Image (cartoon, helix red, strand yellow):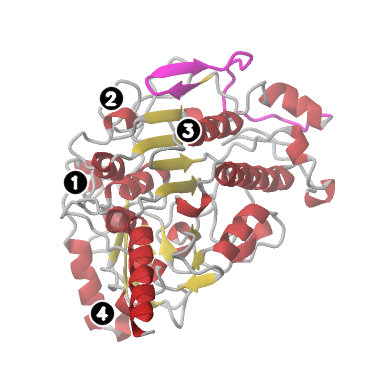
Amino acid sequence: MKTLSILLFASFLFVGCAQESATPNIIYILADDLGYNELGSYGQKIIRTPNLDKLAVEGMRFTQHYSGSPVCAPSRGTLLTGKNTGSGYIRDNFEMGGWGPNEPEGQLPLLDSEFTIAEMVKPLGYTTGFIGKWGLGGPDSEGHPNNQGFDQFYGYLCQRVAHNYYPTHLWQNGTPDSLEGNAYFASHQKIDAPLETDQDYYDLFAAEHYAPDKMLESALSFLEDNKDNPFFLVFATPVPHLALQVPLESLNEYPDSLDSEPFLGGSYLPHPRPHAAYAAMITRMDRDIGTMLAKLADLGLEENTIIMFSSDNGTTYSKGVDASYFNSVGSLRGLKGSVFEGGVKVPFIVKWPGTVKPGSTSDHVSAFWDLLPTVAEITGAEAPTNSDGNSFLATLKGNSAYQTPDKPLYWEYHAFGGMQAVRMGDWKGVRLEIRRQDNAPVQLFNLTSDPNEENDVASANPDIVALIRAVMDARIPSVREDWNFVRDSNP
C-alpha cells in the first residue's frame, strides 16, 4: 500500500512537472483608449462586452494595473521593451510626417538597440506576430515590427493613418495591402449642419473594407498557421480610438435613444449617433475577440494558451467621445494625456487554464513594463537585466505571499508643459507643468484613502515627497532634449 502511494505521488509530480514545463502560447490583446470602467466586468452599464466579461469569469481581473503612458506610442514602447518612460527611448508621440495621403508614414522609430519581448522569446522557438496598430516606426525604419523581433505584421504602421478605420491600405510586413474600394478621405473633418440620414454620413465617411475586420482575418490566419508550434501574438486593435466609425449593422445594435444630437466633427470625423457609435465600436471589438477565442478552442489550443487583455491608456478627452456619459473612468481623476489615475489606470485580465484561478481578482500593483519579465519567467527566456519591471507570475499562480512587490512605478509625459508621476506603495506623487515653472512642486495623494486624487497631502508628508521626488530625479536623460523637461523660454 505504501509503495502504491509513493508511485501515485511520483506520478502526480511527473504530471505536474510536465504541465509546468509545457511551452504555452501567449496572446496579448491591447485596446486603444479604452477606459478603466468600459468593460462590464469593471462596472460598465451601457456598453455590452460579453466575451471580455466571460474572460474575466474564466481568469483573473487586476484592479491596480497601469499602462505605460497616457498616450499611444510610448505606452506600446514600455509594453514591448520592459522599460518605463524614464529609461526607454520612446517617451512621447512624435510624428515623422504630416497629414495627407502622400506624407511619410510613421512615428519616431524604436531603436534597433532596444530589446523587445518578441526578440526574447524567438530563440525558444516561438513564432511572433503583431497585428493592429504599431506606432513605433514606419516603413523601411529600424522600428518596423519585422526589425523588432516580429516574424509577421499586419495592420497600421502609422498612428495618423489609424485615425481612419477605412484606410486605402494596411501593411503586410513590408508590403502595402491595398484595400480596393477604399478611396482616400481626410480623417479630420467638420460639417456645418447635420446630414439628413445615417446613410448620408456613411456615404461620406465609410468605405468597403473596415480595418478591424481585416485585422481579425489576419489574426485567425495566424492562429491557423501556427497551431502546431508555440506562438506569441500581440493583437493591438485600434478600437475605440477616434474617429467614430463602425459598420452600420453594429451601430444599429444600439438604440437611437442613446443620442440626443449628432457630432459634427472637427478634431475627428462627424457621426450622427456618437454615443451609439462609441458603444458599438467596443461591442464589435468584443465580438472579434470572442471569434478569436472560439478559433483557439476549435484548434484545440485553448488549454495551452495564455490570454491577456488591457488598454494602452485611459479614455480620450477628444470631442466626439463622452467619457462622463459612459462613466468611462468612474470617479478617477483625468483622462488620456494625464498621469492622474484616469489617464493610466487600465483594465487587465489574464486567462491561463490550469494556472490562473477562474473568477479571481488581484489588487497587485503592476504596469506594462512588468510584462517582459513575466513572460521571461513563464517561458524560461533570458530576460534583460535593465528592465524596470518585476514578474507577476506568482500572482497569476495565486501565490501572492511570494509575489515580489513592484518597484516604484514611474511615468513622464511631455505635452501640456510636461508632467511626471510616481506610485510608491499606497502613495502617488504628481508634478505638472514642469517646463513652465521653476522647481514644480510634487502633489501627493494616498490612493488607499483617496483613490480619486482629490486631496493633496504633500505638506503633511515631506519625507514621502522627498522619496518620490528622488525617483523622479533618477530618470535617465533622454537623447532628445525636448524630452528632458527643459524650461520653456516662453511659458
Is 173 one of the magenta-colored residues?
yes
Name the mark on residue 141. Answer: 2
The answer to whether the residues at label 1 and label 4 have Cβ atoms under 8 Å apart is no
Instruction: State left or right for residue 221 relative to residue 280.
Output: left
Rendered location of residue 179, percent (x, y): 57, 17
Identify residue for label 3.
222
Q: Secondary structure at mark 1?
A: loop
Magenta segment, prevailing SS (helix, strand or loop): loop
Q: Which residues are magenta?
A: 170-196
Vertical relation: 116 (above or below) 185: below
Q: Is residue 158 magenta?
A: no
- Please say if the residues under marks 3 and 1 sit with CB atoms less than 8 Å apart: no
188 in relation to 477, above or below: above
10 Å crowding of disc 1: few (<14), some (14-19), many (20+): some
Mark 3: give few (<14), some (14-19) or many (20+) Cα within 10 Å: many
- Residue at 44 percent of width and 78 percent of height: 455
Residue for badge 1: 478
Please report whichever mark, 2 or 1, sits nearer to the chain's N-terminal start: 2
Residue 76 placed where, x, y %? 37, 45
Task: Write down the residue under mark 4.
Answer: 464
**Is any atom of residue 430 visible in this view?**
no
